[in-house]
């Protein structure tokens, strides 16, 4: 009789316990995907993106698997989340060299999503790229256009001057990318706004700006990009530090 009560109690307790992927996701990932490393994962838009790399010649093919609740997911927004993770990874791996992205082609039993991305039969997302010092202008424009179209855009201002602020998701290594387009003012105004936003973003206002470069605002997505900005557009890459 006592044994039956003990078993009943254990079953009741197990029913109330959270799944391991909810209670301790790092441990769940370690035991289910023991062959993966931290650099093989990114969290974007509430998806855990698992990233597989295949290297051949000087190119890298990425296969991205969006996951939720510990399983591959095709819930709304999974393609955009995979694309954001891919652009983050390409930016991190290429550094100051712009990534050159191969034109997409449909794999066996898969489909072409857009100019750069394709999808396999198992719903994972693919893209192929390599890093090089220079790329063709058209390739750069289309890649930049698509990359920043995935950013979150909001209005801000500095000294009464309005600005677009575009923010990309944080990369796996902690790098953050932000683009500011001021409608007037000077480069110094742009940098003042950037420092204010970065200070507000980073805990205890501790940060390190990794790069501060001129940029362009490019629209629209879906046809040849048109540069609509002036000189006062800058792109900042930074880390929050302890």
Image: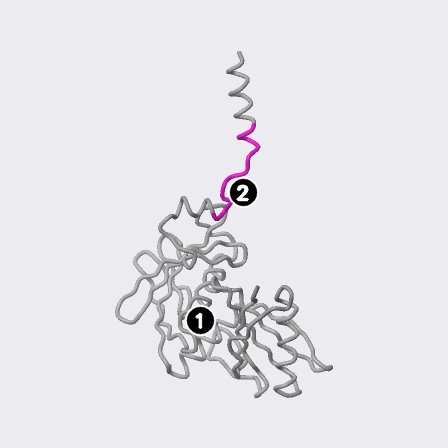
Badge 2 element: helix
Q: CA distance from mark 1 to mark 2?
A: 32 Å
Residue found farthest to the right:
160
Q: Earlier in the sequence, mark 1 or mark 2?
A: 2
The label shown at residue 75 is none
Q: Compared with residue 142, is residue 49 higher up or lower down, i.e. above or below?
A: above
Q: Residue at x 56, y 84 (%)?
A: 228
Give the camera-side residue of 92 and 156: 92
Badge 1 element: helix
Residue found farthest to the top:
1
Which stretch appears magenta?
13-26
Residue 240 colored in magenta in the image: no
Residue 168 screen position, x and y as percent:
54, 68
> CB atoms at circles 1 and 2 under 8 Å apart?
no
Q: Label the magenta part by its dominant secondary structure.
A: helix
Q: Residue at x 64, y 72 (%)?
A: 197
Neighbor class of circle 2 (other Cα within 10 Å; few <14, some 14-19, many 20+) is: few
Give the camera-side residue of 204 and 26: 204
Q: Compared with residue 70, is residue 151 higher up or lower down, i.e. above or below?
A: below
Q: Residue 196: which quarter of the image?
A: bottom right
Residue found farthest to the front:
242
Residue 39 screen position, x and y as percent:
42, 59
Residue 74 screen position, x and y as percent:
47, 52
Q: Compared with residue 118, is residue 216 higher up or lower down, i.e. above or below?
A: below
Residue 10 screen position, x and y as percent:
53, 25
Q: Determine whether, in the image, residue 225 is placed left or right of residue 126.
A: right
Which residue is tagged 1? 91
Q: Residue at x 61, y 86 (%)?
A: 187
Which residue is tagged 2? 23
Q: Residue at x 46, y 45 (%)?
A: 27
Neighbor class of circle 1 (other Cα within 10 Å; few <14, some 14-19, many 20+) is: some
């Amino acid at each position: 009789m006592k044994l039956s009560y003990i078993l009943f109690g254990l079953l009741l307790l197990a029913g109330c316990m959270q799944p391991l992927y909810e209670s301790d996701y790092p441990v769940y990932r370690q035991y289910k995907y023991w062959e993966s490393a931290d650099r093989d994962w990114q969290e974007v838009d509430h998806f855990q993106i698992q990233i597989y790399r295949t290297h051949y010649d000087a190119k890298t093919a990425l296969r991205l698997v969006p996951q939720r609740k510990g399983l591959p997911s095709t819930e709304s927004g999974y393609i955009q989340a995979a694309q954001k993770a891919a652009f983050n990874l390409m930016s991190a791996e290429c550094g100051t060299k712009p990534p050159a992205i191969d034109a997409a082609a449909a794999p066996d039993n898969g489909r072409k999503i857009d100019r750069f991305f394709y999808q396999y039969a198992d719903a994972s997302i693919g893209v192929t790229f390599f890093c090089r010092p220079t790329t063709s202008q058209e390739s750069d424009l289309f890649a930049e256009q698509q990359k920043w179209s995935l950013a979150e855009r909001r209005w801000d201002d500095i000294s009464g001057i309005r600005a677009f602020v575009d923010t990309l998701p944080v990369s796996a290594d902690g790098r953050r990318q932000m683009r500011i387009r001021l409608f007037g003012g000077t480069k110094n105004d742009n940098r003042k706004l950037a420092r204010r936003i970065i200070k507000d973003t980073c805990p205890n206002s501790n940060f390190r700006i990794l790069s501060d470069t001129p940029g362009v605002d490019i629209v629209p997505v879906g046809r040849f990009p048109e540069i609509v900005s002036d000189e006062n557009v800058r792109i900042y890459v930074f880390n929050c530090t302890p």
